[in-house]
Image (spheres, grey):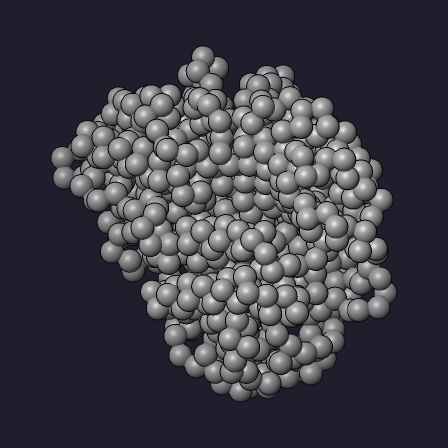
C-alpha cells in the first residue's frame, strides 16, 4: 500500500506500517457541529489525559457488548477528514482476510458510498453487492441467509449524494426487493432489512446528524494520532531521527500546527511544508491560511525543482498553461464542487478534463479508478478536504466571481442552514484577502487579489460583526475570519452599541479560545453578555480567559460539566468583578459544596443580582446558604429541577424559584429565548427546540408558557415556509406538531 509519507514510487507493506488510532467509545454529538477539522484542538489532548485505558476500543471489539446484555449490531464510526476512517476499514479487512483478528463474523461485505452514487435507478441489496463482486453470485443467498454472522461495512456516508434523505419512511425487507438506493440503505441501517446482520457506517462529523440515530447501538470517534504517534510519523517521514526531532521541535512551538498534527493527513501536510519551505523557521505561521499558503508555495517550488524537465516542456508554446493558470483551474474545480457539496470529481467532468496532461495536478489531487459493468472511470478528490476549501478560497479571491454571503442569516436566518459547510472556506478566504497573504500569493504564484474585493470583504466583516455583537447571534466563525486577517484595525473598527459574544453549543478548541481572546482583547469596556453554554469549557479554559470574564455583565456557563476547580475560577471572578450581575450555571453538575464556594464569593463583592442554576444537584441545605444573600444582592435565584425535598421552606422568599411560576421571571426567560431563536440559523434553532420543548405538561397552563409557545410556533411556521432543505423541514415540522398538541 502506498502511504502519504513514502518517497515517490516506494511501497510499504500495510502490515509493516500502520499507526494505531485511538478509538473513543461515546456519542460525539449528533447535534450539528462546526467545521469538522476545527473540532479538534485541546479535545484531543484531553482524551489522552482522562482514563484513556477505559475508552480504547480495538477494531475486534467494535461489536462486543460492554454490559453483556444489549447486543451491538449497528456501529457509527466518525472522524474528521484525513483522520483514518478508510484506513481503519482497510485494516479490518486486512486482518480478517489474514485471520489476524478475532472478528466474530463469517463474512464481510464492503461497499463505499462513492460507488453507490453511480447507481441512478432502482436496485436491491443483492445487486448492490454483486456490482463489485460478481464472483459471489452463486454464494450470496447463503451469505445473506447467515445474517447473524455477517458484517456489512459502508464507508464514506458523507460522500453519499443522498445523505440528507436517509430517514426514510419506505422500507424493503428482502435482499432481492427493488427500491431506490437511499431506501435500501435506510432499510438496512434501521433494521428492516437483514435485522440480525451487523452494520458499520463511517462518516465525517458534518453529515452524521442525517443518520437515523435511534437505531445506532454504538458511536465511535476516531481521535487521531497521539503525541507519540505524531513523533513516529515525523520519524518515518524524515527518515533521520535528528532531523525529525528538530522539525517536531519547530512544530511544538506553534500551538496551531501541533494541534492539527493530531489529524494524520494534516500531519503529512505539515511535514511537506517543513521539508520544502526555507521560510518557516524564520516566520512561523500564525493562522490556518498562513500554513496553507506556505504549503502551496512549498509544493509548487518542489514541483518546479524536482520535475524541472517536465515543467520546462509544459512551458513551451502550445503546451499547458503557466503555474498560475493551473492553480486557477484547480481553484475553479474546488470552488464549483464545494458549492455543490461534492468532494469527488469524475474524469468526464468538464473542470476535470481541463486539467488533463498537467503533472502538477497529481500533487494536489488523488486519483482512483472505479470499475462498473462494461466500463471504468477515474475518480478524483483533493488530498484533503481542507485543501479543496483552500483552493476554492484562492479562486474566489482572485477572480471576478462575487463573494459568497458569509452570513446569509444576518437578515434571514432560515437561509443559513449550511451546517458549517463553508466555515473553513470563509476563514481561508478572509486570510487570503489579508494584505500579507495577498502579497505572498502575488509574489510566489502570480495571482492577484482584486483590491475592490479586499475592501468589500473588510467592510463586510466589520458590518456583520457589529450586527452579531448587537443581536447576540452566533459569532464564532466571524471571529475566526477576523483572526485570519491579523489586522487589529479591523477589530477596532467594530463599534457595536452593545457587546454580546455568543459561541454556545460549540465544543470549543484552543484555537477557538485564541480567536475569542484576540477579538475581546482589542475591545474596551464591559462585555454585556458572554454565552459559553454547552461548549465543553474546562477549568483550564476558564482560567485562561479569566481576565475576559471579569468584564462580563451576563455570563452563561450552563450545560458544561463544571468540577470544583472550574467553580473556584468562577468564584474568583465573582470576588474580583465589578461588572458581573447575572450568572447562568444550569445543568452544570454543581451541588451543595460547589454552591457553598460560590455563595462565599458572592458575599465578598455583593454584585451578583441573578443566579440561574436549574437542573443541578443542589438540595435544601445548599439553598439555605443563599438565605442571607436574598433579596440583596441576589434579587433572583432560579433552582428548578434540583434536589429539593421541602420546597415549602422557600415559598416565603420571592427571590428563590424552585418551581415553575406564572410571573415575570419566566416571561422574561421566554422573551430571551425567542430573541435567541430569531437570530439563530435553522440548525441551531433545532438545538434550542430540543431543550425548550421538554418542559413539564403542567407548566404549559401558565400564561407565560401559552404566549411563549405560541410565538415559538409562529417562528417555526415562518422558518418552514422559507426552508429549502427537506431534511431540515422534516425536523421543524416535528416540533411544529409537538407544539400544536
Where does the image place residue 15, in percent across and percent down from the top left? 68, 46
Q: In front: 59, or 614? A: 614
Q: In the rendered picture of this protein, how many numbered marks are placed on residues?
A: 0
Q: Residue furthest left?
A: 317
Where does the image place residue 320, in percent across and percent down from the top left? 21, 39
Left or right? Give the position of 736 relative to 614: left
Visible residue check, residue 413: yes
Quick check: 91 above or below 696? above
Residue 551: quadrant of the picture: top right
- The C terminus sits in image quarter: bottom right
Where does the image place residue 381, in percent across and percent down from the top left? 41, 50
Q: In front: 438, or 616? A: 616
Please give the name of the residue rendered at 63% of the width and 56% of the height, measured from the top-left corner: 77
Residue 31: quadrant of the picture: bottom right
Q: In front: 495, or 234? A: 495
Please give the name of the residue rendered at 47% of the width and 75% of the height, measured from the top-left corner: 181
Where does the image place residue 35, in percent across and percent down from the top left? 48, 45
Residue 493: quadrant of the picture: top left
Quick check: 564 above or below 116? above
Q: Residue furthest top?
A: 282
Please give the name of the residue rendered at 68% of the width and 45% of the height, measured from the top-left corner: 655
Quick check: 258 above or below 655? above
Left or right? Give the position of 32 relative to 17: left
Please give the name of the residue rendered at 66% of the width and 69% of the height, measured from the top-left corner: 698
Visible residue check, residue 209: no
Left or right? Give the position of 60 relative to 33: right
Amino acid at each position: 500500500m502506498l502511504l502519504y509519507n513514502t518517497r515517490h514510487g516506494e511501497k510499504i507493506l500495510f502490515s509493516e506500517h500502520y499507526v494505531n488510532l485511538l478509538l473513543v467509545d461515546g456519542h460525539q454529538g449528533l447535534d450539528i457541529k462546526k467545521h469538522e477539522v476545527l473540532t479538534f484542538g485541546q479535545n484531543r489532548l484531553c482524551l489522552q489525559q482522562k482514563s484513556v485505558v477505559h475508552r480504547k476500543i480495538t477494531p475486534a471489539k467494535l461489536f462486543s457488548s460492554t454490559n453483556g446484555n444489549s447486543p451491538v449490531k449497528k456501529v457509527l464510526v466518525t472522524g474528521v477528514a484525513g483522520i483514518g476512517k478508510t484506513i481503519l476499514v482497510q485494516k479490518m479487512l486486512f486482518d480478517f482476510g489474514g485471520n489476524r483478528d478475532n472478528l466474530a463474523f463469517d463474512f464481510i461485505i464492503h461497499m463505499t458510498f462513492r460507488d453507490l452514487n453511480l447507481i441512478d435507478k432502482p436496485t436491491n441489496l443483492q445487486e448492490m453487492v454483486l456490482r463489485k463482486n460478481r464472483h459471489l453470485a452463486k454464494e450470496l443467498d447463503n451469505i445473506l441467509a447467515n445474517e447473524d454472522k455477517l458484517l456489512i461495512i459502508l464507508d464514506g456516508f458523507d460522500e453519499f449524494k443522498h445523505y440528507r434523505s436517509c430517514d426514510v419512511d419506505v422500507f424493503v425487507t428482502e435482499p432481492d426487493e427493488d427500491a431506490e438506493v437511499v431506501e435500501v440503505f435506510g432499510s438496512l441501517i434501521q433494521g428492516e432489512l437483514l435485522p440480525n446482520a451487523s452494520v458499520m457506517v463511517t462518516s465525517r462529523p458534518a453529515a452524521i446528524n442525517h443518520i437515523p440515530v435511534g437505531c445506532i447501538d454504538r458511536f465511535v470517534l476516531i481521535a487521531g494520532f497521539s503525541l507519540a504517534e505524531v513523533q513516529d510519523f515525523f520519524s518515518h517521514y524524515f527518515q533521520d531521527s535528528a532531523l525529525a526531532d528538530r522539525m517536531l521541535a519547530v512544530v511544538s512551538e506553534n500551538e496551531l500546527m501541533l494541534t492539527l498534527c493530531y489529524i494524520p493527513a494534516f500531519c503529512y501536510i505539515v511535514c511537506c511544508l517543513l521539508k520544502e519551505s526555507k521560510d518557516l523557521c524564520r516566520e512561523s505561521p500564525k493562522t490556518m491560511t498562513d500554513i496553507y499558503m506556505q504549503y502551496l508555495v512549498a509544493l509548487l517550488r518542489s514541483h518546479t525543482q524536482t520535475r524541472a524537465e517536465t515543467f520546462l516542456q509544459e512551458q513551451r508554446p502550445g503546451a499547458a498553461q503557466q503555474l498560475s493558470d493551473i492553480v486557477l483551474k484547480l481553484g475553479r474545480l474546488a470552488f464549483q464542487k464545494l458549492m455543490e457539496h461534492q468532494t469527488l470529481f469524475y474524469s468526464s467532468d468538464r473542470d476535470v478534463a481541463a486539467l488533463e496532461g498537467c503533472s502538477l495536478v497529481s500533487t494536489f489531487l488523488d486519483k482512483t479508478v472505479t470499475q462498473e459493468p462494461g466500463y471504468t472511470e477515474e475518480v478524483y478528490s483533493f488530498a484533503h478536504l481542507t485543501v479543496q476549501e483552500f483552493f476554492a478560497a484562492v479562486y474566489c479571491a482572485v477572480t471576478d466571481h462575487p463573494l459568497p454571503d458569509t452570513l446569509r442569516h444576518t437578515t434571514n436566518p432560515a437561509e443559513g442552514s449550511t451546517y458549517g459547510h463553508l466555515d473553513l472556506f470563509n476563514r481561508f478566504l478572509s486570510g487570503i484577502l489579508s494584505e500579507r497573504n495577498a502579497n505572498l500569493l502575488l509574489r510566489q504564484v502570480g495571482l492577484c487579489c482584486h483590491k475592490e474585493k479586499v475592501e468589500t470583504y473588510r467592510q463586510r466583516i466589520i458590518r456583520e460583526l457589529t450586527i452579531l455583537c448587537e443581536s447576540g447571534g452566533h459569532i464564532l466563525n466571524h471571529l475566526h475570519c477576523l483572526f485570519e486577517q491579523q489586522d487589529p484595525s479591523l477589530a477596532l473598527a467594530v463599534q457595536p452599541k452593545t457587546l454580546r459574544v455568543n459561541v454556545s453549543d460549540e465544543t470549543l478548541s484552543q484555537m477557538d479560545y485564541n480567536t475569542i481572546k484576540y477579538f475581546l482583547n482589542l475591545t474596551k469596556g464591559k462585555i454585556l453578555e458572554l454565552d459559553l453554554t454547552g461548549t465543553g469549557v474546562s477549568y483550564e479554559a476558564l482560567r485562561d480567559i479569566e481576565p475576559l470574564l471579569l468584564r462580563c455583565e451576563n455570563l452563561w456557563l450552563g450545560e458544561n460539566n463544571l468540577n470544583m476547580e472550574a467553580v473556584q475560577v468562577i468564584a474568583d471572578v465573582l470576588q474580583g468583578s465589578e461588572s458581573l450581575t447575572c450568572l447562568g450555571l444550569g445543568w452544570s453538575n454543581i451541588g451543595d459544596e460547589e454552591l457553598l464556594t460560590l455563595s462565599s464569593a458572592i458575599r465578598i463583592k455583593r454584585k451578583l443580582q441573578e443566579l440561574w442554576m436549574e437542573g443541578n444537584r443542589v438540595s435544601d441545605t445548599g439553598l439555605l446558604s443563599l438565605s442571607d444573600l436574598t433579596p440583596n444582592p441576589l434579587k433572583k435565584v432560579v433552582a428548578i429541577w434540583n434536589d429539593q425535598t421541602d420546597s415549602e421552606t422557600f415559598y416565603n422568599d420571592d427571590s428563590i424559584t424552585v418551581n415553575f411560576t406564572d410571573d415575570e421571571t419566566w416571561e422574561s426567560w421566554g422573551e430571551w429565548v425567542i430573541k435567541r431563536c430569531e437570530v439563530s440559523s435553522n440548525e441551531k434553532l433545532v438545538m434550542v427546540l430540543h431543550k425548550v420543548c421538554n418542559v413539564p405538561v403542567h407548566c404549559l397552563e401558565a400564561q407565560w408558557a401559552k404566549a411563549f409557545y405560541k410565538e415559538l410556533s409562529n417562528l417555526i411556521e415562518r422558518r418552514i415556509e422559507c426552508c429549502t432543505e427537506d431534511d431540515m423541514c422534516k425536523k421543524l415540522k416535528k416540533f411544529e406538531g409537538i407544539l400544536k398538541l
